[in-house]
Amino acid sequence: MHRVLLVVFRSRIVDASGNERAIIEDVLKADPRPKGRFRWVHTQIARKLDKYKEKYRSLFPAEGLADADYVIYFNVVEFRRILDTIYPYGELFVIVKGSPEQLKPPRVVWRANKVLFAEDAIGNLIKELKAVRGES
């Protein structure tokens, strides 16, 4: 069983080199409590994770960064308005915290292929989790 912390915010870092080190540092310093409209995005993603958690009992929410084994980070890139409804789009990352005692640095273990609607991004992650773990 893994403890997971969900973090949602708009990163101020743009890294075109493909090196995710700057993103990891930004996430590890961030406040895990969402503010403003990011709270709404956090709730959407958390709802999908809760359904997965209830069904498969393999993930549990972490209270803070110190308790988490993994950080699921949704980087909000933009809010699109389509037919009078607002949709958050962004990138989803799964970061394993690592272990300083064992000299294992934090690293990105999963990343969404492209910028996606928040619920689609978390849906893709859950689909891949099920496939890797053999859950149906």
Image: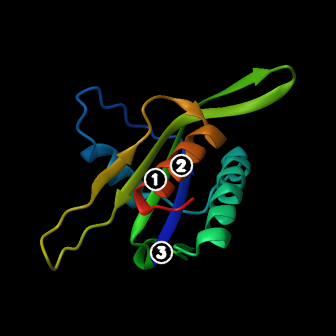
Q: Amino acid at mark 2?
A: Lys
Q: Amino acid at mark 1?
A: Ala
Furthest residue in direction top, as rendered: 83
Return the residue at label 2.
127
Along the line of sight, which residue is nearer the eye, 62 or 122?
A: 122
Return the residue at label 3.
3
Query: Nearer the observer, disc 2 or disc 3?
Result: 2
Residue at point 26% right, 60% down?
106
Quarter-of-image position of residue 14: top left
Q: Earlier in the sequence, mark 2 or mark 3?
A: 3
Residue 114 rendering spot, x and y as whole percentages: 46, 29
Return the residue at label 1.
131
Along the line of sight, which residue is nearer the eye, 12 or 51?
A: 51
The answer to whether marks 2 and 3 mark residues whose Cβ atoms lie closer than 8 Å is no
Residue 19 rendering spot, x and y as whole percentages: 23, 38
Q: Earlier in the sequence, mark 1 or mark 3?
A: 3
